[in-house]
Amino acid sequence: MSKAEAFRALHRRPGPADPLVLPGPWDAVSARILAEAGFPALATPSEGVAAALGYADGAVPADEMFAAVARIARTVDVPVSADIESGYGLPPRELVERLVEAGVVGCNVEDSAGGVLKDPRAHAEWLAEMRAAAGDRLFVNARIDTFIHGITDPEKAVERAVLYGAAGADCVYPIGAPPQVLPVLRSAIEGPINAFAGLDGPDPAELGELGATRVTFGGALQQRAADTLRGIVAGLRRPRT
């Protein structure tokens, strides 16, 4: 079984309380630690990788992002999916080939750019082109940004999910959806649903019970690691007694 096939199979979970948990490495060291901890696959967060590279989220040049995720993918034996924001303006075929060259087997792609939601039908057509170029080589996670843009009506997210699924997306990611909305989305959306988990919010098992197929954490792990380092550094600066 190829890594892409293995990653796809991981989304067929045995029960609702057992979602696929995909922690987000931001560099090679964090990827190795997470793989050694036993996670069967990883999903890079654009925010965490951006911080590691010294950029604000959304400001990483495409070449640097692909190089970063390639380093992560070659460091571990488990499948890796990459957050590629809104695709860096690349044509779908070129985007697919660059992802495959980087050694990743999946991607997370947003349906907004520059703070503006994309037209859902135009984005679905773009996803269909990406699917045609990728075949079975990539697992495409289509992010739905309605909630983070202040559109709280779940039906608006469902409309996009249906279009993206029909275009060939393997999974949809209604980022920012409140946990209590997940059952509504689950009842209306066929196929896997990705839910975001904050480190202080509902745990993955709870999100699975609400309807999530897989759970990711965005840049939360990198932020927590940075906070831990700040605490260590503060201790180093204390005067000796």
Image (spheres, helix red, strand yellow):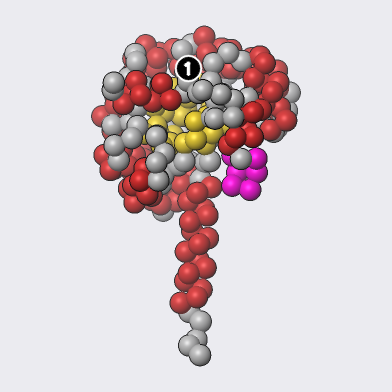
Q: Is residue 139 above or below residue 52?
A: above
Give the residue displayed 53% in from the left and 47% down from the top.
220
Residue 150, x across and y down, in percent: 70, 32
In the image shown, does 73 or 155 lie closer to the viewer? 73
Give the residue type at disc 1: Ala
Count of numbered badges drawn on the protein: 1
Give the residue displayed 48% in from the left and 79% down from the top.
237
| Residue on which the image places disc 1 | 169
Instruction: State the quadrant of the N terminus.
Output: top left
Could you say which quadrant of the image residue 77 lies in? top left
Can residue 179 be seen at all in this image of the molecule?
yes
Q: Classify mark 1: residues with Cα within 10 Å, few (<14), some (14-19) or many (20+).
A: many
Could you say which quadrant of the image residue 158 lies in? top right
In the image shown, does 47 or 216 lie closer to the viewer? 216
Give the residue displayed 64% in from the left and 34% down from the top.
206
Residue 20, x across and y down, in percent: 49, 30
Q: Is residue 43 above or below residue 27?
A: above
In the image shown, does 152 or 196 lie closer to the viewer? 196
Give the residue displayed 34% in from the left and 15% down from the top.
136
Prevalent SS, magenta region: loop
Residue 228, x across and y down, in percent: 50, 62
Could you say which quadrant of the image residue 94 lies in? top left
Can residue 95 be seen at all in this image of the molecule?
no
Residue 74, x across and y down, in percent: 26, 39
The part of the chain drawn in magenta is 196-202
